[in-house]
């Protein structure tokens, strides 16, 4: 299916212009077609939009296909997400090394517009928006008057209920009596909603044109011409049939003297303002949609011989495979589905991210509280909320929690939250805490977590924790499999990391992953007793007595003892030939990251690349290896070896 343009398709390559059509030799008017030339970065703090802004530049690449394509612009009103997804395991998170923290923006703005610029200023007669996913959320189109930098409204409407297919949206515009090359598109989404755009086209004229009939607006004229080529019921879109798009403008170009005149004076513009008072649309299309959950017509009942004929048990099994957005839609179908979609077994996992408004967060908790009776996994990333509200939610929904990821941006004290977690969440197996500094947890710190006895994973990215408190937690949680400590260990001892490592060696012999900084050979020797270790991240290794070979011996013992190692991160250490050989004997090794590491014999590093059959990534950061050797390894193992940082001279 080929999209129709009123010009040759090969002219698409003439970016930023698509085409320039003149009406004739005598007093000509140029009709100019162009796609986006540039965009503003500072109009949004939405990370998803920022990462995809570049895809709005130029012509369409996906249209008329429909889908949630990665190489298209994503527009959403709210920069937060809510889903029923399970928590991602740590090893699947991006930017694992050297710091595995997932940073979330604190300065979140609810931006709902897109500012774009075209190459040439024109008098706009049409704006065509290529919507390839979740269309119907554009509510306003503005143009900027360069003389005073004011934004003038060209079109406004309500969100529309449209089928899940791609759409070329070209709403009827009001008259614009000045040239412009800057547009602003405004959107309105629900909390769970977003739109994907493939391109935006601006069609305009080099001179201001008006209909020859003074009783008719330019938009009415285009509607009349449009009806000659494409008869459709969508009065809000002049290009509903994209295969015949812009044939009305093409007809106008070819028959310009018959339909239009060139405006000689801007004063005349006041007599040709568009009047949409006679436009009547169906209640369905003009319906206000304040939230995505109102998008279903409640009057539509499923026929008895179709889906509704299934038993409740069968329907619930199907509903378990739906995402949250679809569940919110399903509960509007009828009374039966409203009851079924409230079943607590559908809400065992809840992921809420970047909710910076406490009011929104409270309303969301109120919505989910009656549904989350059996909640097991809860992920709160960069959320701002009242401690009392969250404590109330935990009292109602927290008794079955097994996984909790807690990243907060609120400045309010969270002692009550941590205490309530330790009292209610007795079945908690995985706990991750971040962004809780000393100002939010008070003097008690994390000592209340000593009451938990079923932990298998503990990740502390902030704040500091007393070593004595941490050791008590480890003593009560002997099934600990993962311990990630990227926080300050407070202790009177010189090397508090060693104390933690010794406790792990004594109490948590089944440990599989450790991230610990500032330990000496004594701590490394203790970790060697955890023979099931698979992931080891040891940063800032210390030489307690100033002896390099203390570290060499202890590291050799660790590598010899832990034969299941898959990922190793080492920082600030000297690797001897013996340890290089032991690293090469780690047959399960998949990822190796060495930062600021020196080698006794740099040439021997290559044995790791040659003898580790499962090695997927070997990364050197801030190294001391000659550029010649680096270049040789890149050539011999281009898909495994990576260099980050650069060569450091001794």
Image (cartoon, helix red, strand yellow):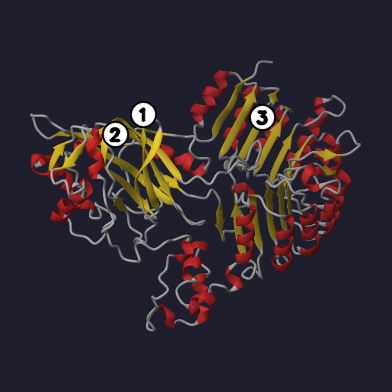
Mark sitting on residue 121: none
Question: How much space separates mark 2 and mark 3, taking CA atoms?
Answer: 59 Å
> Which residue is at 35% across, 66% downward?
284
Report x, y in % for residue 416: 79, 56
Q: Is residue 263 left or right of residue 353?
A: left
Marks 1 and 2 in Cβ contact (< 8 Å): yes
**Callout 3: SS:** strand
Mark sitting on residue 595: 3
Q: Which residue is mark 1?
A: 147
Residue 485 in sight in this render: yes
Q: Nearer the viewer, residue 265 or 518?
A: 265
Report x, y in % for residue 375: 65, 66
Quarter of the picture containing the C terminus is top right
Between marks 3 and 1 in the image, the one whose residue lies nearer the viewer: 1
Q: Which residue is mark 2?
A: 178
Of labels 3 and 1, earlier in sequence is 1
Report x, y in % for residue 41: 47, 34
Q: Is residue 46 left or right of residue 13?
A: right
10 Å crowding of disc 2: few (<14), some (14-19), many (20+): some
Of labels 2 and 3, earlier in sequence is 2
Report x, y in % for residue 42: 49, 35
Q: How many marks?
A: 3
Q: Is residue 446 left or right of residue 167?
A: right
């Amino acid at each position: 299916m080929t999209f129709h343009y009123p010009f040759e398709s090969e002219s698409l390559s003439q970016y930023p212009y698509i085409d320039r059509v003149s009406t004739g030799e005598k007093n000509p008017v140029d009709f100019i077609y162009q796609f986006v030339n540039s965009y503003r970065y500072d109009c949004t703090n939405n990370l998803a939009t920022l990462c995809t802004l570049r895809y709005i530049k130029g012509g369409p690449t996906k249209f008329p296909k429909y889908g949630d394509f990665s190489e298209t612009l994503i527009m959403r009103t709210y920069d937060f997400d809510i889903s029923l997804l399970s928590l991602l395991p740590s090893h699947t998170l991006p930017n694992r090394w050297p710091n595995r923290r997932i940073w979330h923006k604190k300065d979140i703005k609810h931006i709902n517009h897109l500012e774009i610029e075209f190459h040439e200023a024109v008098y706009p007669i049409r704006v065509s928006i290529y919507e390839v996913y979740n269309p119907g959320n554009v509510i306003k189109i503005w143009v900027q008057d360069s003389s005073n930098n004011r934004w003038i409204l060209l079109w406004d409407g309500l969100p529309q209920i449209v089928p899940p297919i791609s759409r070329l949206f070209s709403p009827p515009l009001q008259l614009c009596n000045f040239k412009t090359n800057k547009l602003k598109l405004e959107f309105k989404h629900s909390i769970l909603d977003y739109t994907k755009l493939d391109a935006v086209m601006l069609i305009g004229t080099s001179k201001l044109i008006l209909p020859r009939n003074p009783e008719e607006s330019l938009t009415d004229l285009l509607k009349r011409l449009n009806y000659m080529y494409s008869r459709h019921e969508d009065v809000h879109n002049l290009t509903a049939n994209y295969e015949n798009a812009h044939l009305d403008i093409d007809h106008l170009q070819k028959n310009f003297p018959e339909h239009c005149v060139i405006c000689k004076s801007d004063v005349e513009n006041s007599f040709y303002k568009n009047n949409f008072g006679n436009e009547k649309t169906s209640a369905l299309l003009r319906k206000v949609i304040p939230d995505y959950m109102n998008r279903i017509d409640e009057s539509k009942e499923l026929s008895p011989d179709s889906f509704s004929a299934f038993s409740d048990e069968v329907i619930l099994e199907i509903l378990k495979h739906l995402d949250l957005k679809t569940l919110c839609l399903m509960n509007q179908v009828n009374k039966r589905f409203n009851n079924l979609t409230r079943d607590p077994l559908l809400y065992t996992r809840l992921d809420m991210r970047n909710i910076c408004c406490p009011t929104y967060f409270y309303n969301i908790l109120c919505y989910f509280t009656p549904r989350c009776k059996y909640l097991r996994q809860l992920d709160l990333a960069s959320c701002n909320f009242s401690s009392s509200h969250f404590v109330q939610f935990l009292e109602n929904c927290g008794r079955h929690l097994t996984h909790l990821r807690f990243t907060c941006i609120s400045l309010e004290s969270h002692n009550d939250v941590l205490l309530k977690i330790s009292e209610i969440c007795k079945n908690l197996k995985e706990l991750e805490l971040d962004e809780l500094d000393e100002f939010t947890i008070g003097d008690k710190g994390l000592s209340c977590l000593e009451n938990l006895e079923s932990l298998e994973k503990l990740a502390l990215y902030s704040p500091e924790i007393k070593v004595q408190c941490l050791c008590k937690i480890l003593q009560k949680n002997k099934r600990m499999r993962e311990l990630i400590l990227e926080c300050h260990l407070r202790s009177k001892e010189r090397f508090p990391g060693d104390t933690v490592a010794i406790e792990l060696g004594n109490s948590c012999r089944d440990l599989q992953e450790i991230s610990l900084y500032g330990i000496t050979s004594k701590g490394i020797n203790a970790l060697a007793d955890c023979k099931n270790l698979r992931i080891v991240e040891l940063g800032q290794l210390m030489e307690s007595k100033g002896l390099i070979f203390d570290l060499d011996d202890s590291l050799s013992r660790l590598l010899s003892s832990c034969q299941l190692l898959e990922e190793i991160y080492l920082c600030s250490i000297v690797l001897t030939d013996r340890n290089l050989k032991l690293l090469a004997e780690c047959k399960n090794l998949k990822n190796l990251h060495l930062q600021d590491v020196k080698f006794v014999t740099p040439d021997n590093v290559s044995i790791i690349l040659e003898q580790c059959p499962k090695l997927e990534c070997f990364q050197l950061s801030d190294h001391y290896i000659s550029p010649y050797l680096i270049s040789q390894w890149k050539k011999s193992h281009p898909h495994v070896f990576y260099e980050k940082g650069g060569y450091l001279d001794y």
